[in-house]
Amino acid sequence: MVMIMPKRNVFFISDSTGITAEALGLSLLAHFDGIEFEQHRVPFVDNVDKAREVVTRIDMAREKDGHRPILVMTLVSSDIRAVFSECDALNLDLFGTFINPLSAELGLIPAQEIGMARRVASNEFRVRLNAINFTLKHDDGVSDEDLEEADLILVGVSRCGKTPTSLYLAMQFGIKCANYPLLPEDFERRQLPGTLAQHRSKLFGLTVTAERLSSIRKERRPDSVYSSLHNCRHELVLAEDMMRRENIRYLDTSSRSIEETATTVMQQFGIERH
C-alpha cells in the first residue's frame, strides 16, 4: 500500500521583500522528501491590519486542506508577530526565536528598522562584485597587475578547475582570487610563471588525476597531444613536482565538486569569507 503524503501550505511572511524568509524556509523544507509544499510568499506585511488580512488567508488554507499551515516569518515588529501567534499554525519566527535571546545576551535593544538585512546584503553584493571583477581580470594569467590585492592565487595545469573555483570563491565569498596556468615552458625553466614568485605566500595549487584531466581536455581538443593520457600524466608529474619544490600546498580536485573544492581551499589556506 502506497502512503499518500498530505500537501502542506507554507507561508513566507516578511515586513520587507520576503527573500530572507523564503531562503530560510526552503533550506528547512529541503530536508523533507515526499511532501508537496504549496508555497506563498507574503512580503511587505508592515502593519497590524495587513497581518490580520494574511491571518485570514492562513485560516482559509487550513480549512481547505485540513492541516495546520507552516509560517516562516521575518518580522521586526513584536506587535505584528503577536497577530500571527493567535492563528492555528506552526510558527517559525526567525526574529522571535533568535533576536530576543541575542538581545538579552548582549544587553542591547535591537533596532526596529525594516529592511536592515537587505542593507547588509547590499554591502555583501558590492564586495562580491568587486571580487568578481578582480577575478575575471586575473583569469588564466591574463594580467599580473595589482596582484598584491589578491586574497588567493590558484595555480595548476590547464583545465584542472582553476577558473570555476576562482569564480565560485569570488561570487559566493567575496574573495579576490587570481589564477595562473602552469605551462610546459614553465617546467622547462623550472620557474613559476610571471611575477608569481613575488606572491608565494598567496599561492595554492590544484591538481587532478591524469584520467580525469584527459577526459576534460578531450571535450575541448579531442585526438590531440594536449589531451592524450600520456601528456596529461607528464604535465601533472612536473606540476606537482614544481609545487612541492616551491613549497606550495595543493589539492586533488578529481572527486570534488566546485563547491567542495572552494570550501576545502579556504579551509586549508586559512582564508575567511569577506
Image (cartoon, rainbow, N blue to C red):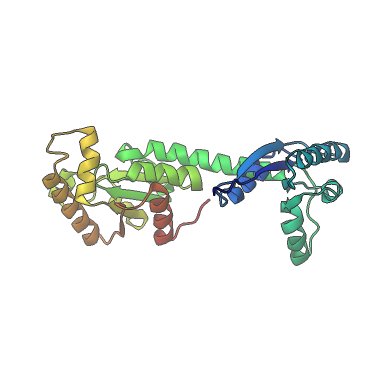
Q: Residue at x 16, y 44 (%)?
A: 184
Q: Nearer the viewer, residue 18 or 114?
A: 18
Q: Nearer the viewer, residue 165 or 65?
A: 65
Q: Nearer the viewer, residue 147 or 217?
A: 217
Q: Residue 245 appears at what percent x and percent y? A: 21, 61
Let me know if residue 176 appears in the view.
no
Count all numbered tags in the image, as a single digit.
0
Q: Residue 76 appears at what percent x and percent y? A: 78, 48
Q: Residue at x 87, y 41 (%)?
A: 48
Q: Residue at x 56, y 52 (%)?
A: 31
Image-quadrant location for residue 180: top left
Let me know if residue 236 appears in the view.
yes
Q: Is residue 28 left or right of residue 161?
A: right
Q: Residue furthest front?
A: 1
Q: Residue 136 appears at what percent x and percent y? A: 40, 36
In the image, residue 176 sits, relative to residue 96, either above or below, namely above
Q: Residue furthest bottom?
A: 105
Q: Is residue 221 left or right of residue 137?
A: left
Q: Residue 268 appears at what percent x and percent y? A: 39, 61
Q: Nearer the viewer, residue 45 or 152?
A: 45
Q: Is residue 84 left or right of residue 165?
A: right
